[in-house]
Image: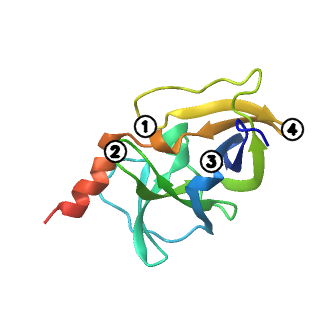
Amino acid sequence: MTNATMRVVEIWLGTHRFGIQIAGIDEVLPLVECRSLPGAPQWIIGMAQLRGAFVPLIDCGAVLNHTPVERTMNARIVLLQAGAVGGSMRLALLVDGVGAIVTVNPTTDGAHPGIAGTGRGALGAITNDDKGEICLIDLARLLNDQDRQLFRDAGTSP
């Protein structure tokens, strides 16, 4: 492997294939019940109790492509640490499915560096491997600081 290659877990949102760098993933779990949060934005499913702690459960489809994830037998929860300027926080992403661990090169000829937006759902590089197109999710920019503040404010409310 060269320095430009990385190992990612492939996830599916509908028919679209995405990748999350393996170093950012703590665990992949089956769908679990969660506590809904009245008044929360549509992309926040609620709080799930995972491994003894409450973790925000985010609909990855609603965040990235505005198509909510269907709750089927194939749906999975990806438990991860999402970094940002405001610090790291533990999140759980609901995805339509999880595939294999693959090696990709985001700097290969023909790759696109991604979308450098400042809002929620900013994407990393878009590249190809032997299975086709894969878009990398930039965990540092998955949620913006205003979105993260929703969870921090809830934790400090009386």
Examine the image and state in which quarter residue 89 appears: bottom left
Residue at 55% across, 34% down: 123
Residue farthest toward the top in the current orientation of the protein = 110
Mark 4 or mark 2: name the one nearer the start of the chain: 4
| SS at badge 3 | strand
Q: Between marks 4 and 2, how big is the CA–CA gap?
A: 35 Å
In the image, 125 versus 107, the foreground residue is 107
* Residue 69 point in image, percent of width and height: 58, 51
Q: From the viewer's perspective, is 81 left or right of 84?
A: right
* Residue 84 point in image, percent of width and height: 40, 44
Disc number at residue 120? 1
| SS at badge 2 | helix
Q: Which residue is mark 4?
A: 130
Q: Nearer the viewer, mark 1 or mark 3?
A: 3
Q: Nearer the viewer, mark 4 or mark 1?
A: 4
Would you place residue 134 above or below residue 95 in this image? above
